[in-house]
C-alpha cells in the first residue's frame, strides 16, 4: 500500500514514510492508494473475532511491509487494551463509549497507535523527532500521554489559551519530561495554521525532523476505523445502524466512512457539529466556506476549517450527490446541547458529555418518525467537562482518582501570540 498526496505534487510513499512526514511536502494530506475490501465472511462473523484480531485485520493492509506482523500485533494489543462498550441509552440510540482510555477521550486510540509506530520507525535512528501537534482540547493530552518518556521524541503541543477545559489543560501541561505545551493566544485554527506553516518552513525542516500528530497523520487517522468495527461486533439489530459522530476536524467520521467502504454495514452517517457549521452549510449549499472558529461548550469540535473534509470528498470522488446520500451534517446550538444533557439524564440517568450530547441531539432528530436505530460515538468522558455538566444536571459527578490527582499538579506552559514567527523562534532556539 502506498500513499499519495491529495495535492498530487509529491511522490507516493509507504506507511512508515507517511507516518514520519505527517503532511506531504506539497502541503497535501496523504491518502491511501486504494481502500481494501474485507471478506464478507469477516463481517458476517465479526462476533467470533477478538478485538486484537479485528485490529490486525483492519490495519495490516494499510501498514503493509512497514511493520512486521508480530510487532504490528503487539502495537495493536497495547493500543486497545481498554474497553469499548456499546451502551444502550434509549429505545433507539446507543453510545459507543470511547472514553475508557488513559486520557478519557477517543483520541487515545489514534495517539497510542501513532506513538508506538513512530517509536518503532525511529528505533535505529539517532536523530530526535519533534512531534508538533495542535489541539482543540483532547488531542494534546492523548498525544502527550502516548509519547511521554519515549526516547528520541520531543512533543510540542499548541493549544488555544482559555478555550480548553481545566481537565484538558492539566492533562497536557503537567507531564514535563519530553512534553512542552505552548499556550497560544488564539483559536484552534490559529494553532493548526501555525503547525502547518512549520511543516513547510525550510529552515525548520533543515534543523529538525518534524512530524504531525494531528489526524492529518495517517498513523493517527486510520486506526480510528477500529472502533466502528468494535461497535458492529456489539450491534444486535438486524438492520445496519445509523452512525452519528460528533465532528470537529472530521478525522473520526472520515475513518468511519473508510471502514464503511471496506465493508462495515452502516445505513447512514451523520456528522454532528456545534455552532461551527462549515460542513452543514456545505451540504445545504454546495459551497465550502471556512470560517473563523467560534467557542462553544463542546470545545474539542471548535474547528472552522476541518482538515479532513478533503479526505471525505476524495472518498466520494468529489461527487456531491453521492456524498449527500451517505452523509448528513447538522449544527446543534449550545443551548440545545445543554437541554439534551439535562433531558437524557432525567429520562435515562445517563450522563452525556457536551460532545456526545451534540451527537445525541442530531441522531434523535434524524430518527424522528423513522423505524431505524443507531449509535453515537461517545468521544469523551463527562468528567472532562465538570463545569458544564454539573451545572446542567444540577448534581456533582464522581471524579475518578486519576483526574483528582491532576488538580494538585502545577500547570506549565509557554504563552505565545498566534504568529508563526514565535513558534519558529521557539523551535529554533530549543
Ligand atoms: C477531537 C474530538 C472530537 C472531534 O473529532 P474529529 O476527528 O476532529 O472530528 C469530538 N469529540 C471530542 C471529545 C474530541 O476530543
Image (tube, helix red, strand yellow):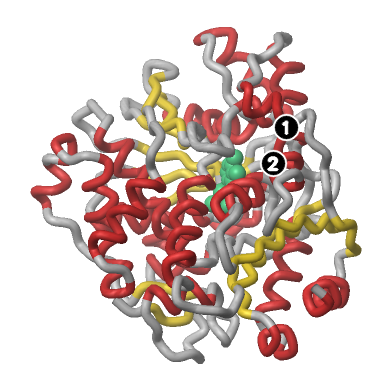
Residue 50 in view here: yes
| Circle 2/circle 1 CB separation < 8 Å | yes
Q: Quadrant of residue 88?
A: top left
Residue 279 in the figure: left or right of residue 167: left
- Name the foreground residue: 45 vs 108: 108
Residue that appears at 54% across and 51% down: 146
Q: Sort mark 1 into few (<14), some (14-19) or many (20+) by Cα contacts within 10 Å.
A: some
Q: Quadrant of residue 208?
A: bottom right
Asked if residue 199 is positioned above or below residue 150 in the image, the reply reads: below
Q: Which residue is mark 1?
A: 406
Asked if the beta carbon under badge 2 is closer than 8 A to the nearest atom of ligand 1, the reply is: no
Q: Please tell me the numbered disc located at residue 153.
A: none
Q: Earlier in the sequence, mark 2 or mark 1?
A: 2
Asked if the beta carbon under badge 1 is closer than 8 A to the nearest atom of ligand 1, the reply is: no
Give the image location of residue 155, x and y in percent: 66, 62
Q: Please tell me the numbered disc located at residue 171.
A: 2
Amino acid at each position: 500500500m502506498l500513499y499519495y498526496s491529495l495535492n498530487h505534487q509529491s511522490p507516493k510513499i509507504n506507511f512508515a514514510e507517511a507516518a514520519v512526514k505527517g503532511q506531504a511536502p506539497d502541503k497535501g494530506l496523504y491518502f491511501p492508494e486504494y481502500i481494501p475490501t474485507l471478506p464478507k465472511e469477516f463481517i458476517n462473523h465479526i462476533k467470533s473475532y477478538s478485538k486484537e484480531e479485528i485490529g490486525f485485520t483492519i490495519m495490516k493492509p494499510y501498514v503493509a511491509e512497514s511493520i512486521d506482523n508480530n510487532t504490528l500485533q503487539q502495537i495493536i494489543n497495547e493500543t486497545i487494551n481498554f474497553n469499548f462498550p456499546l451502551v444502550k441509552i434509549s429505545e433507539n440510540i446507543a453510545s459507543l463509549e470511547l472514553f475508557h482510555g488513559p486520557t478519557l477521550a477517543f483520541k487515545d486510540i489514534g495517539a497510542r497507535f501513532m506513538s508506538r509506530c513512530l517509536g518503532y520507525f525511529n528505533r535505529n535512528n539517532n536523530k530526535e523527532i519533534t512531534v508538533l501537534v495542535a489541539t482543540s482540547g483532547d488531542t494534546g493530552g492523548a498525544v502527550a500521554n502516548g509519547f511521554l518518556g519515549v526516547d528520541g521524541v520531543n512533543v510540542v503541543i499548541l493549544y488555544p489559551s482559555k478555550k480548553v477545559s481545566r481537565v484538558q489543560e492539566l492533562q497536557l501541561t503537567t507531564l514535563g519530561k519530553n512534553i512542552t505545551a505552548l499556550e497560544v493566544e488564539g483559536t484552534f485554527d490559529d494553532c493548526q495554521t501555525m503547525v502547518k506553516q512549520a511543516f513547510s518552513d525550510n529552515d525548520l525542516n533543515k534543523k529538525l525532523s518534524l512530524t504531525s500528530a494531528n489526524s492529518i497523520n495517517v498513523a493517527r487517522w486510520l486506526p480510528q476505523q477500529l472502533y466502528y468495527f468494535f461497535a458492529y461486533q456489539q450491534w444486535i439489530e438486524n438492520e445496519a445502524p445509523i452512525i452519528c459522530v460528533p465532528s470537529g476536524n472530521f478525522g473520526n467520521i472520515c475513518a468511519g466512512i473508510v471502514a464503511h467502504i471496506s465493508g462495515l454495514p452502516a445505513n447512514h452517517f451523520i456528522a454532528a457539529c456545534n455552532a461551527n457549521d462549515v460542513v452543514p452549510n456545505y451540504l445545504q449549499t454546495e459551497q465550502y466556506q471556512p470560517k473563523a472558529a467560534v467557542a462553544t461548550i463542546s470545545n474539542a469540535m471548535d474547528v472552522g476549517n476541518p482538515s479532513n473534509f478533503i479526505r471525505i470528498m476524495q472518498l466520494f470522488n468529489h461527487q456531491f450527490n453521492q456524498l449527500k446520500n451517505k452523509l448528513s451534517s447538522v449544527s446543534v446550538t449550545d443551548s440545545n446541547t445543554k437541554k439534551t444533557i439535562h433531558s437524557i439524564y432525567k429520562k435515562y440517568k445517563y450522563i452525556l458529555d457536551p460532545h456526545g450530547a451534540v451527537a445525541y441531539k442530531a441522531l434523535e432528530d434524524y430518527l424522528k418518525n423513522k423505524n431505524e436505530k443507531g449509535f453515537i460515538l461517545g468521544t469523551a468522558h463527562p468528567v472532562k467537562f465538570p463545569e458544564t455538566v454539573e451545572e446542567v444536571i444540577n448534581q456533582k459527578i464522581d471524579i475518578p482518582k486519576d483526574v483528582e490527582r491532576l488538580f494538585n499538579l502545577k500547570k506549565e506552559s509557554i504563552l505565545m501570540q498566534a504568529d508563526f514567527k514565535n513558534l519558529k523562534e521557539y523551535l529554533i532556539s530549543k
